[in-house]
Image (tube, rainbow, N blue to C red):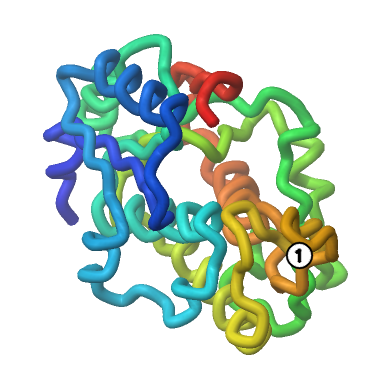
């Protein structure tokens, strides 16, 4: 296992679309970089993603937002370090990356979830829970159903999905990636038939250009929060919650 990206204070960001960033988004990115001059900010774009090994075949059918969700798990497992949505941060992440390097007990650091309303809706997965192997022990209830009950009850122990630091190649990140690929396998036939039509596409969302419900198969948060939230709960004693909150207002 290597912790080079923690030692080097690497923070990954992704831009998975072919379009240019808006001026507001570019300002958010520049602001984040300005706050983190001691860190190595890596903006990963489509050219770099095309060269990665082991990317699931369904990746190319995902919406740009869910491509980012996929890459969060991929990068945190294979590389580790920090990840942030392209949003401004009020202070440097350098002390938190240093803490990760110094404290081998820590698996991750994030910002605390704001409330029960932010908990992923695990029941919305749409896949048959009987087919689950990797998500079984942290996202299914005793009756074998997808369930958010235990996660919602313990929402104070969770971290948000938009910014975090993780140690690479741990049990947590392996289960995160395994759970992600399990879901990608399950949705693949539908993904091929109904690939994403717009950046924020999700199952039953309204397509802006047509006003019709999208046939894109994956509901919002299913390949990110639905996996990460229950895993964080399982490992919460080794995850800190004091990373600075990102600016979730002035970024689009």
Front residue of 17/242: it is 17
Q: Position of residue 159 (x, y in %)?
A: 57, 33
Residue at 38 percent across and 22 percent down: it is: 27
Q: Position of residue 158 (x, y in %)?
A: 62, 34
The C terminus, quarter of image: top right
Q: Is 141 rendered above or below residue 160?
A: below
Residue under label 1? 203
Q: Is 28 rendered above or below residue 190?
A: above
Q: How many labels does the image show?
A: 1
Q: Quadrant of residue 122?
A: bottom right
The N terminus, quarter of image: bottom left
Viewer can see residue 141: no
Q: Which residue lies furthest to the top in this view?
A: 90
Does 200 sit left or right of 8 as displayed?
right
Q: Is 43 rendered above or below residue 213?
A: above
Residue at 28 percent across and 63 percent down: it is: 49
Residue at 15 percent across and 51 percent down: it is: 2
Q: Position of residue 178 (x, y in %)?
A: 48, 70
Q: Quadrant of residue 33?
A: top left
Which element carries disc 1, helix, strand or loop?
loop
Viewer can see residue 91: yes
Q: Position of residue 56 (x, y in %)?
A: 42, 77
Does 150 sit left or right of 235 as displayed?
right
How many C-alpha atoms fall within 10 Å of the one at disc 1: few (<14), some, or many (≥20)?
A: some
Does 129 sit left or right of 160 as displayed?
right
Front residue of 103/4: it is 4
């Amino acid at each position: 296992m290597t912790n080079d990206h923690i030692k080097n204070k690497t923070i990954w960001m992704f831009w998975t679309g072919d379009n240019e960033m808006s001026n507001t988004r570019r300002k958010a990115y520049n602001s984040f970089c300005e706050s983190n001059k001691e860190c190595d900010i890596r903006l990963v774009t489509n050219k770099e993603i095309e060269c990665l090994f082991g990317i699931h075949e369904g990746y190319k059918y995902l919406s740009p937002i869910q491509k980012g969700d996929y890459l969060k798990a991929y990068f945190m497992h294979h590389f580790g370090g920090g990840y942030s949505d392209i949003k401004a941060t009020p202070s440097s992440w350098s002390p938190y990356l240093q803490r990760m390097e110094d404290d081998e007990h820590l698996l991750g650091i994030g910002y605390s979830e704001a409330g029960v309303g932010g908990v992923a809706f695990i029941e919305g997965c749409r896949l048959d829970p009987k087919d689950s192997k990797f998500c079984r022990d942290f996202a299914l209830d005793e009756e074998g159903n997808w369930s958010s009950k235990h996660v919602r009850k313990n929402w104070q122990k969770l971290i948000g999905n938009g910014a975090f630091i993780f140690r690479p190649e741990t049990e947590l990140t392996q289960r995160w990636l395994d759970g992600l690929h399990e879901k990608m396998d399950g949705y693949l036939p539908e993904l091929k038939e109904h690939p994403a039509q717009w950046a924020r596409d999700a199952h039953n969302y309204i397509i802006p250009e047509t006003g019709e419900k999208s046939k894109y198969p994956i509901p919002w948060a299913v390949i990110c929060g639905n996996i990460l939230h229950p895993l964080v709960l399982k490992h919460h004693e080794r995850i800190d919650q004091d990373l600075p909150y990102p600016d979730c207002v002035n970024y689009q």
